Amino acid sequence: MLRMASFGVGGWEGSVKIVVVGYDDLPELLPLVRAYCDFYEVAPADEALLALSRALIADPAREGVQVLARDGAGAAVGFATLYWTWQTLDATRVGIMNDLYVAAEARGGGVAGALIAACLEHCREHGATQLVWQTANDNRRARALYDRLGATREDRWLDYWLPVEPA
């Protein structure tokens, strides 16, 4: 799948191609994923991040997909990760956009919107009825984008988690 959008917003002009990540893209994807992890102040091992990407590449229909944004010169400038699951309360399949990241030099030019649009298209193709995601409360720039896109903010739920200790 190849999506292309042209834009010239926020001083960064160019075109972006959105492609599904393949094995050959991993060397360019990894620095973007690392920058994303740095933003959230976490440090999983590179090999673990690559294993995640390889699992998605190997079984996209079951696991999900990663999409990569390339600028007009072909450089990787952003990515999104989309996982598949079910929503019991609606009895429908949904896509979870677990990650969305755009390199600093490409921000404000429509790359994030193009990545979200690609995720929406993958959801349609997969039979999902919603694209859902979370962002940090203090990520005001991302929240402003989501508001501009018309996304619905859900305030009913609180997130919880527990670690799973090895047996």
Image (cartoon, rainbow, N blue to C red):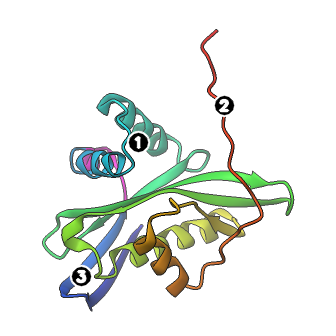
Furthest residue in direction front, as rendered: 138
The one of 84 and 151 positioned closer to us in this rendering? 151
**CA distance separating discs 1 and 2:** 24 Å
Query: In the rendered structure, which disc, 2 or 3, sits on the residue that comes first in sequence?
Result: 3
Q: Which residue is mark 2?
A: 162
Q: Secondary structure at mark 3?
A: strand
- Could you say where residue 101 lies in the image, as x and y percent from the top left? 36, 61
Q: Which residue is mark 3?
A: 15
**CA distance separating discs 2 and 3:** 42 Å
State the extent of the magenta-drawn residues as a range: 20-26
**CA distance separating discs 1 and 3:** 25 Å
Name the quadrant of the C terminus.
Answer: top right
- Give the total number of marks visible in the rendering: 3
Residue 53 position (above or below residue 119): above
Residue sitting at x 31%, y 46%: 38
- Could you say where residue 7 lies in the image, as x and y percent from the top left? 28, 88
The one of 69 and 44 positioned closer to us in this rendering? 44
Tag of residue 53: 1
Query: In the rendered structure, which disc, 1 or 3, sits on the residue that comes first in sequence?
Result: 3
Instruction: Give the side of residue 73 with respect to residue 18, left or right.
Output: left
Furthest residue in direction top, as rendered: 167
Is mark 2 in CB contact (under 8 Å) with mark 3?
no
Tag of residue 66: none
Dot 3 surroundings within 10 Å: few (below 14), some, or many (20 or more)? some
* Amino acid at the residue labelled 2: Leu
Q: Secondary structure at mark 2?
A: loop
* Amino acid at the residue labelled 3: Ser
Q: Is residue 82 magenta?
A: no
Residue sitting at x 12%, y 72%: 73
Query: In the rendered structure, which disc, 1 or 2, sits on the residue that comes first in sequence?
Result: 1
- Could you say where residue 127 lies in the image, as x and y percent from the top left? 69, 65
